[in-house]
Amino acid sequence: MGLIIGGLMPAVVYGFTNVFVKMSVKEGISPPMYVMAAGVGIIIAGAASLLFHTDMSISSRSASYAATAGFLWGAASFGVAYALQVYNSPIAKLVPLFNMNTLVAVLLGMWLFAEWKGVNSSQLILGSVLIVVGGTLVARA
């Protein structure tokens, strides 16, 4: 169930998210205002998530990691909105490129959390090669 809730559902939701990014930019929002408006949406999603998971545990360390994740997400989102607005980049090309973030997350997860102990290295390497090939093909389309 964890792979559905934490993998499949976010994949579908992130797909819709990118369509709304494009729609927002097409309607004239500036990239900084996009990031701030999206932040309001995140606050609402956080409050709504309490309906499903009422645990409100927090520490200064966990909060600083969460704030860093939010800052990094905001910086990346600004880049996407900027590319859409200033360069009129097609979202259909941007999404596969920035989703190569999978490679970064996989490498950092293996290194920082020793997740390399529980993965099939040959499948991981093959999957990584396919991600890079796919991103390259889409960027050249």
Image (spheres, rainbow, N blue to C red):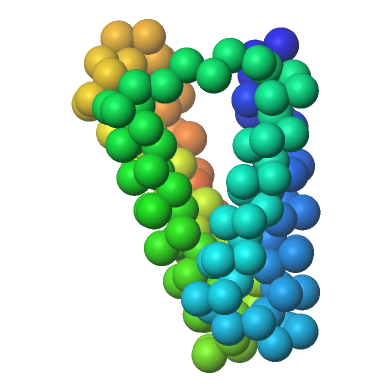
Name the quadrant containing residue 122: top left
Q: Do we see residue 137 in this rendering?
A: no
Could you tell me which residue is drawn at 44 percent across and 34 percent down? Answer: 126
Q: In the drawing, does residue 119 fall left or right of residue 21?
A: left
Residue 50 location, quadrant: top right
Residue 40 placement (x, y as % from top left): 63, 56
Q: Residue, x 28% and y 27% (percent of image)?
A: 61
Residue 27's place in the image compared with 79, above or below, is: below
Residue closer to the observer: 132 or 76: 76
* Horizontal arrangement in the rendering, residue 11 relative to residue 137 (left or right): right
The quarter of the displayed image where residue 2 is located: top right
* Nearest the eye: 135 or 26: 26
Q: Position of residue 4 (x, y in %)?
A: 72, 21
Q: Position of residue 60 (x, y in %)?
A: 30, 28
- Give the left or right position of residue 138, taking residue 70 as reference: right
Residue 115 vertical placement versus 88 (above, below): above
Tell me the residue at 40%/37% (across/down): 66
Q: Position of residue 135 (x, y in %)?
A: 51, 59
The quarter of the rendered structure image containing the C terminus is bottom right
The residue under the point 69% across, 45% down is 44
